[in-house]
Amino acid sequence: MKRSRLAVAHGLFNLTAGLWPLLHYRSFEAVSGPKADAWLVKCVGGLAVGAGYAQLRGRASPEGLASARRIGVGTAGTFAAVDLIYGGTGRISPVYLLDALVEAMWLRAWAKDLMVERYDCPARPIDQRRRIGPASVLDVP
């Protein structure tokens, strides 16, 4: 997947997932199970919206893509961990185990993205590297 498309896809996923409990809490709870604290669900939803928006905005530059990746790994890792820890215990609905699978796929996609970026990064010849500190015969004037 092209790097900017990955940022957009995951950004839209986070944005949509975050908006759902904010816009229609009743249907969110019908699918994901009853919640003890609606305010906490809405808070997490708002954070997911912010993360998704940042990922969407980050697709325009290499630095932005790196930020989108960090946000993507952070959100997917956090959501997957919570899903796996609590999804099978009865604390939250087992449907969250399906979300853990989706989050694992996002983590895999971002890991692949990082490998592609590192592979495509051209190495600088040794004679163009600069050392910090005293002058050296290897330094370029």
Image: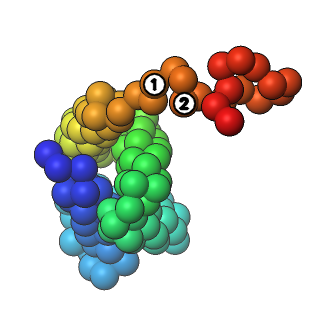
Above or below 73: residue 115: above
| Residue 35, quarter of picture | bottom left
- Which residue is situated farthest in the left direction here? 1
Which residue occupies the foreground of this view, 113 or 22?
113
Which residue occupies the foreground of this view, 82 or 126?
126
What is the three-letter code of the residue carrying label 1?
Pro
Which residue occupies the foreground of this view, 135 or 81?
135
- Which residue is situated farthest in the top direction here? 137
Q: Secondary structure at mark 2?
A: helix
Residue 40 in the image: state x and y as whole percent: 52, 64
Above or below 68: residue 54: below
Query: Is disc 1 in contact with disc 2, using a CB cutoff of under 8 Å?
Result: yes
Could you tell me which residue is drawn at 54 percent across and 23 percent down? 127
- Which residue is situated farthest in the bottom direction here? 23
Residue 138 in the image: state x and y as whole percent: 66, 19
- Which residue is situated farthest in the right direction here? 134
Residue carrying label 2: 128
Q: Secondary structure at mark 1?
A: loop
Could you tell me which residue is drawn at 45 percent across and 25 percent down? 125
* Callout 2 crowding tier (Cα within 10 Å): few <14, some 14–19, many ≥20: few
Residue 107 in the image: state x and y as whole percent: 31, 36
Rendered image: mark on residue 125 = 1
Could you tell me which residue is drawn at 25 percent across and 57 percent down? 4
Q: Quadrant of the C terminus?
A: top right
* Callout 1 crowding tier (Cα within 10 Å): few <14, some 14–19, many ≥20: few
Rendered image: mark on residue 21 = none
Q: Report the side of 134 relative to 9 (left or right).
A: right
Distance of label 1 from label 2 (alpha carbons): 6 Å
| Residue 131, quarter of picture | top right
Q: Is residue 138 visible?
A: yes
Q: Report the side of 62 relative to 13 (left or right).
A: right
